[in-house]
Image (tube, rainbow, N blue to C red):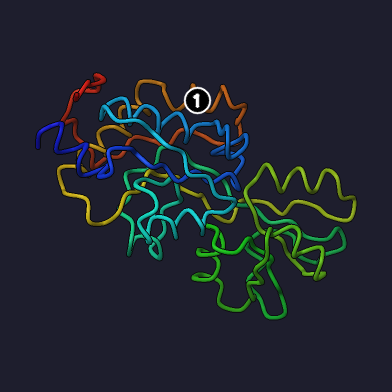
Amino acid sequence: MRDMDLAADLAPTGTLRAAINLGNPVLAQGTPDAPSGVTVEIADELGARLGVPVTPVCFPAARQSFEAMVTGRADICFLAVDPARATAVAFTPPYAVIEGVYAVRVDSPLTAAGDVDRPGIRVGVKEGSAYDLFLSRTLTQARVVRGDEGVSVFTDQQLEVAAGIRRPVEEFVATHQGARLLEPRFMQIRQAVGVPRRARPESLHFLRDFVEELKADGFVADALRRAGRSDATVAPPDTGWCHRESAEPRNLS
């Protein structure tokens, strides 16, 4: 597939519209007018390789980023891989991994993450988040309660458990004497680049190579370090990946 064909397939309007989830502080920081973080840097690098400008389209939650992909308002997104999303979005191998953890009240009888799935337990989650999708699919006895944030619905409705990504949950516990962290993690959240499923196979191969190279050459690690996100780790190499294209930036004009 020619380079210009890649650009036309991945950025059909001539501009790469990147859905940025400002609701996940690991992936993006800043404001809608001036976003920053690893996802913004990846989007900019992809635009440079395709030879097209990049327009960040910022949202406060993952579910809105996903909806932008479904409705055609964005060309790429940065979301956790999940079967419910894969019906509409084709994902690359993950570029980073984040941990999902629980918080409970200090007097809770729950002592480990494995204790949560039992009758009478209500788990607060951020609606449409990766851990909402995961827990809704895997918990068989506990009940998921959705809200703006897992810790806020946990507090507001006096739930038994809050779920979220590690650093925000740790920060919540540190500032709320009535809560404690429940170890170990209940999931690994695999963050990946996503594009509409209509994308051609050649474009998907290009994106898989692109992500694997950014992991291998330190780009992702450097971006996470610049953002101060020690709570995310670079995803391991994808064992099914093989190099197909040069990583050199291209000028396609």
Reply above or below: 83 against 10. Answer: below
Three-letter amino acid code at the position of disc 1: Ala
Name the residue nearer the viewer: 68 or 97.
Answer: 68
127 up-or-down from 213: above or below: below
**Residue 7 left/right relative to 130:** left
Quadrant (top left, top right, bottom left, bottom right) of the C terminus: top left
In this view, the residue in front, 133 or 249, is 249
Q: Quadrant of residue 112?
A: bottom right
Q: Which residue is rendered at x = 57% and y = 32% of the image?
A: 34
Relative height, residue 168 to residue 48 (above, below): below
Residue identified by numbered label 1: 223
Q: Residues within 10 Å of mark 1 (few under 14, many from 20)?
A: some
- For the residue pair 34 and 24, the one nearer the viewer reads as 34
Q: Residue furthest left?
A: 1
Q: Position of residue 179 (x, y in %)?
A: 83, 55
Residue 242 percent location from the top left of the image = 19, 34
Up the image or down, 102 lies above or below 246; here it is below
Residue depicted at 55% across the width and 49% down the height: 59
Q: Residue at x 62, y 37 (%)?
A: 31
The percent position of residue 57, horizontal first and vertical second, equals: 48, 44
Q: Is residue 13 left or right of residue 135?
A: left
Q: Between residue 184 and residue 236, name the one nearer to us.
A: 236
The quarter of the picture where residue 240 lies is top left
Residue drawn where x is 62% and y is 26% of the image: 228
Q: Label 1, secondary structure: give it.
A: helix
Judge from the rendering whether residue 16 lies leftward or rightward of residue 145; answer left or right.
left
